[in-house]
């Protein structure tokens, strides 16, 4: 069965072009031209992924993202102009999984869609490698769950993927380029500020004191590492 994409975009030429390309790639496409109808479609059509423009009539993309994320874990890719830096960051903070800046190539958008769907649709496995433990942090890869001090912590997909990548390489320094390539399926030309923002959000959720992190350490000029023994201050 074809995967279902909900495209919420008020610029008709973009909606038609993207919709046509997605259909040629084998996706089922549903379109909506404003925030109200987009929210209704998200609730009724149960899409596998939502492509969401931030600048929408009737209901903004940010409000729509906030509402959808309260009701569903469906992956969301936001579309934004390069000048919308604040809105882009807020969108990611509200739970969007990725973003693409306008103008964009359809090829890039499709690559981002497939990358997000691969991570979302990976089925659970029953191996010991599906559970990573470090101090009070437990990452359950199969069920996509994280607990800290035995309390569940909700992480949007991108934050979960980032934590999983770091925790899977405990005590090893991962460069910014490695993290961008693994989590965002892109290279160093991507906005590295997004990586830093996600690191900050992760620290706020799993660290006792985000300003003095025990688990996710910064290695200046290189990248980050996840420390398996939080009581051992190595930096």
Image (cartoon, rainbow, N blue to C red):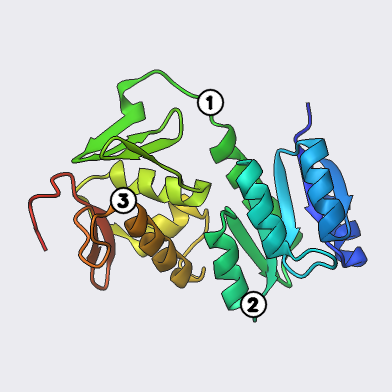
114 or 213: nearer the viewer: 213
Q: Is residue 26 visible?
A: no
Q: Which residue is mark 3?
A: 206
Residue at disc 1, secondary structure: loop
Q: Quadrant of the N terminus?
A: top right
Could you tell me residue 63's position as x and y percent?
69, 61
Q: Which mark is nearer the camera, 3 or 2?
A: 3
Q: Which mark is nearer the camera, 1 or 3?
A: 3
Measured in 3D between alpha carbons, the distance from the residue under mark 1 to the one under mark 3, in whole angstroms, is 25 Å
Q: Which mark is residue 123?
A: 1
Q: Quadrant of the C terminus?
A: bottom left
110 or 170: nearer the viewer: 170
Label 2 crowd (10 A; few <14 / some 14-19 / many >=20) = some
- Asked whether the beta carbons under mark 1 and mark 2 sit within 8 Å of each other, the answer is no
Could you tell me residue 167's position as x and y percent?
29, 44
Residue 73 position by quadrant: top right
Q: Is residue 74 left or right of residue 205?
A: right
- Asked whether the beta carbons under mark 3 and mark 2 sit within 8 Å of each other, the answer is no
Q: Which mark is residue 3?
A: none
Measured in 3D between alpha carbons, the distance from the residue under mark 3 to the one under mark 2, in whole angstroms, is 29 Å
Q: Which residue is mark 2?
A: 84
Q: Residue at x 81, y 59 (%)?
A: 35
Q: Is residue 30 left or right of residue 68?
A: right
Q: Is residue 60 left or right of residue 138?
A: right
Q: Is residue 97 visible?
A: yes
Q: Residue at x 23, y 61 (%)?
A: 209
Residue at disc 2, secondary structure: loop
Q: Residue at x 27, y 44 (%)?
A: 169
Could you tell me residue 172's position as x and y percent?
21, 51
* Furthest-bottom residue in this view: 83
């Amino acid at each position: 069965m074809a995967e279902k994409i909900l495209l919420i975009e008020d610029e008709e030429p973009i909606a038609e072009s993207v919709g046509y390309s997605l259909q040629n790639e084998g996706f089922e496409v549903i379109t909506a031209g404003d925030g109200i109808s987009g929210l209704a479609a998200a609730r009724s059509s149960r899409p596998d992924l939502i492509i969401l423009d931030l600048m929408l009539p009737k209901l903004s993309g940010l409000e729509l993202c906030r509402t959808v994320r309260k009701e569903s874990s469906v992956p969301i890719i936001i579309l934004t102009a390069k000048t919308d830096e604040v809105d882009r960051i807020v969108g990611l903070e509200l739970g969007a999984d990725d973003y693409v800046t306008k103008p964009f190539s359809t090829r890039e958008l499709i690559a981002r869609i497939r990358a997000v769907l691969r991570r979302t649709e990976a089925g659970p496995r029953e191996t010991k490698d599906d559970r990573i433990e470090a101090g009070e942090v437990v990452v359950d890869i199969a069920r996509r769950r994280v607990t800290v001090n035995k309390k569940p912590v909700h992480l949007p997909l991108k934050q979960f993927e980032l934590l999983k990548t770091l925790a899977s390489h405990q005590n090893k320094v991962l460069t910014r380029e490695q993290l961008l390539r693994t989590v965002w399926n892109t290279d160093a030309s991507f906005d590295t500020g997004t990586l830093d923002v996600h690191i900050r959000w992760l620290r706020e959720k799993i660290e006792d004191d985000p300003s003095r992190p025990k688990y996710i350490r910064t290695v200046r000029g290189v990248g980050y590492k996840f420390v398996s023994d939080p009581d051992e201050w190595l930096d």
